[in-house]
Amino acid sequence: MKKKPIKILIPSIALVLALISFLSPSELYAEECKAYNWYCKKNDKHEIPSLDPDFSFINKYGGYYADHNVGNNDKVIYLTFDAGYENGNIEKILDSLKAHNAHGTFFILENLINRNPELVLRMKDESHLICNHTAKHPDMTKITDLDNFKNQLSRLEKAYFTLTGEEMPKIYRPPEGRFSEQNLKFAHELGYKTIFWSFAYADWDNNKQMSSDKALEKLLAHTHNGEILLLHPTSKTNAEILDRFLSELEKEGYRFGNLNELWAK
């Protein structure tokens, strides 16, 4: 009887290299400090975008970009706004939210508390979440020690407490979506959840505003259950279309969720 040849399984080159190689402490530190720009690859299927494998570490440190645990029978969108200053449009955004009884999350800077305290108090009184976008909006990836990282968050916390007499929620969004694994680790150690987004569009440049119809079309084309939507409330276009946008979402059966739901499930 002829013997069958024995098959030897040869590990892939990548696996071999992974097994025989290692990173020095300094190399590990450099990798942890590597800077990234957050993004999501859009799709036209009304589905949550997949997470870039390079960003998988966000799951270890209380990072979220969408609600993956939402049930099929519960259509929810989380409205979030990065608000650094008022130019007349934030007030209009608040008016539209109030008209729809839609609660959102405003990631604010120290500037808004100092210059427009009445606006921040209105946000609070109308039951919006007011969260930490840092005091001065720096590139946080350039801050590589915990004390300086903490200072950007605690400085805003103190300003908020002085104004409202309440503690600011431990919810953080990195300025400009710039982050590193170390940043998320620091935020986690300070008790913060880090919130990214599953859809945004180019709305931040007041000198390059998209037309209202085009912006509304873009937003509606990319809605998805569990979406964390990022909008800039200083955008003239957003102020013009938010009422119509919320009406369309309501027609589609969406409700407007509270970010605290993400870790309460």
Image (spheres, rainbow, N blue to C red):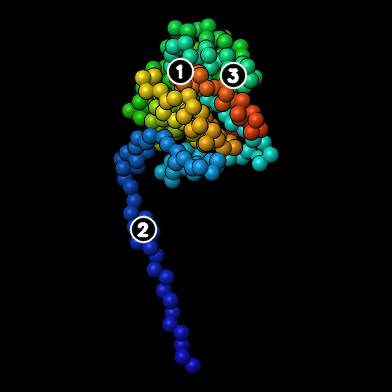
Label 3, secondary structure: give it: helix
Above-or-below relation of 29 to 151: below
Q: Residue furthest right?
A: 73
Residue with the mark numbered 1? 236
Q: Mark 3 or mark 1: which comes first in sequence? A: 3
Q: Position of residue 223 (x, y in %)?
A: 55, 35
Q: Residues within 10 Å of mark 2 (few under 14, many from 20)?
A: few
* Number of the front mark, 1 or 2: 1
Q: Which mark is residue 97?
A: 3
Please say if the residues under marks 1 and 2 sit with CB atoms less than 8 Å apart. Answer: no
Instruction: Between residue 122 and residue 211, name the one nearer to us.
Output: 211
Residue at the image point whose x is 52% and y is 22% from the top = 241
Q: Residues within 10 Å of mark 1 (few under 14, many from 20)?
A: many
* Number of the front mark, 3 or 1: 1
Q: Position of residue 85 (x, y in %)?
A: 43, 13
Q: Mark 3 or mark 2: which comes first in sequence? A: 2
Q: Which mark is residue 14?
A: 2
Task: Indicate the amino acid at tag 2.
Answer: Ala
Residue 160 seen anywhere in this rendered image of the structure: yes
Mark 3–mark 2 Cα distance, whole angstroms, equals 51 Å
Q: Position of residue 218 (x, y in %)?
A: 49, 33
Q: Residues within 10 Å of mark 3 (few under 14, many from 20)?
A: some
Task: Indicate the amino acid at tag 3.
Answer: Leu
Q: Is residue 135 left or right of residue 92?
A: left
Mark 1–mark 2 Cα distance, whole angstroms, equals 50 Å
Q: Position of residue 187 (x, y in %)?
A: 46, 28
Above-or-below relation of 25 to 257: below
Count of marks placed on residues = 3
Task: Indicate the amino acid at tag 1.
Answer: Lys
Residue at the image point whose x is 48% and y is 24% from the top = 212
Q: Is residue 97 left or right of residue 15?
A: right
Q: Is residue 72 left or right of residue 2?
A: right
